[in-house]
Amino acid sequence: MNPFAKVLLFLAGLLLTLVFLGVLAVAVGVVKAPRLVQVTHHWGDVTHDSTQVLTDVELDNPNTFDINTRRLSFQADIAMNEVALGRGSLEEIHLPRGVSTSTVVTHLDNERLTEWWGSHLAGHEFTTLRIKARGVVHLLGRNFTLGAPDLTRTVETDLLGAANSADAQVINQGQVSLLLKSRQLQWGQVTTSTTEILGSMLLRNTGLSSFTVTSRGMLARMNSVLMAQATATDTVTLLPGQDVTVPFRAVMDNSRLLDWWPTHVNGGERTTFYLQITASFQGVAPDGSTFIADLPLLVHQDQFVTHLLGE
């Protein structure tokens, strides 16, 4: 056997011996696997385009020596209603002796919020956020799984439901005398780009004169962000003593969710939902004069709070 072959054989034998000794050391407890103490999540920077979720991974290295390895992987997958928003990973970590904390940064693509929004409304305004955090350490020829319980948070909203009412309301202004008998609001068609808001008001003209609804408007805000605004100019006539259902409609541009989301997260996960419905009336008074009146038919405000990361 030539000298070079002998050297290769020696090195191969040495490598096998080291691997065997490493495995034996782990088996008899000389080298101990790192232990996952806890995983916590909190918000980082939140902008129009992206959202940071910071996952703090607390690990305990029970050995008497530091572990420096590039063979450690840790990742966090984040989804809302099974809509994947982002994955963060940590490929290199230094584990000193004892307990230490490393941070995995996950960048969420805010463009996916429009897809999540559709799932939220389709699911009767329920959302489940799930974060799956998993790690693997390759140490001395063995793989150690660092498993963490999934973080699961379910939140519910009822943005339009609280604005509905079957309680009659008297509205009088000048020559306009109305009984608002009921109001009904609901979500209409939802696509990835738009969301339809539909409303109807059952009105009775309790006055002596006929009048016409000449225009009607709807406006919706979430925090300071204008989500939808629309005006309809087709006319609806109300005769004295007559009940008439007056429809309202607005279409929301779903891209405005990207403007709203930072206000929600940076505001302590709080959102104030504001909805306003107005109508303009025109008619002829008993004395023959023409009257015009602009009336608010609904001013609704509600707040919802989420704790998506358990903070």
Image (spheres, rainbow, N blue to C red):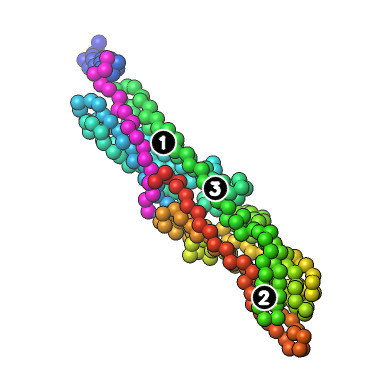
Disc 3 or 2, which lies upstream in sequence?
Answer: 3
**How far apart, in angstroms, are the residues tagged by discs 3 and 1?**
24 Å
Residue in the image at 28% along x and 31% along y: 60
**How far apart, in angstroms, are the residues tagged by discs 1 and 2?**
60 Å
Which disc, if any, is residue 133?
1
Whether residues under marks 3 and 1 lie with C-beta atoms below 8 angstroms apart, the answer is: no
Query: Measured from the top left, where is residue 170 in percent x and y?
Result: 67, 70
Disc 3 or 1, which lies upstream in sequence?
Answer: 1
**How far apart, in angstroms, are the residues tagged by discs 3 and 2?**
37 Å
Q: In what quadrant of the picture does the N terminus appear?
A: top left
Determine whether 224 is above or below 115 in the image.
below
| Image-based side of 292 in relation to 153, left or right | right
Q: Quadrant of residue 296?
A: bottom right
Residue in the image at 70% along x and 84% along y: 291
Local secondary structure at mark 2: strand
Query: Measured from the top left, where is residue 230 in percent x and y?
Result: 63, 68
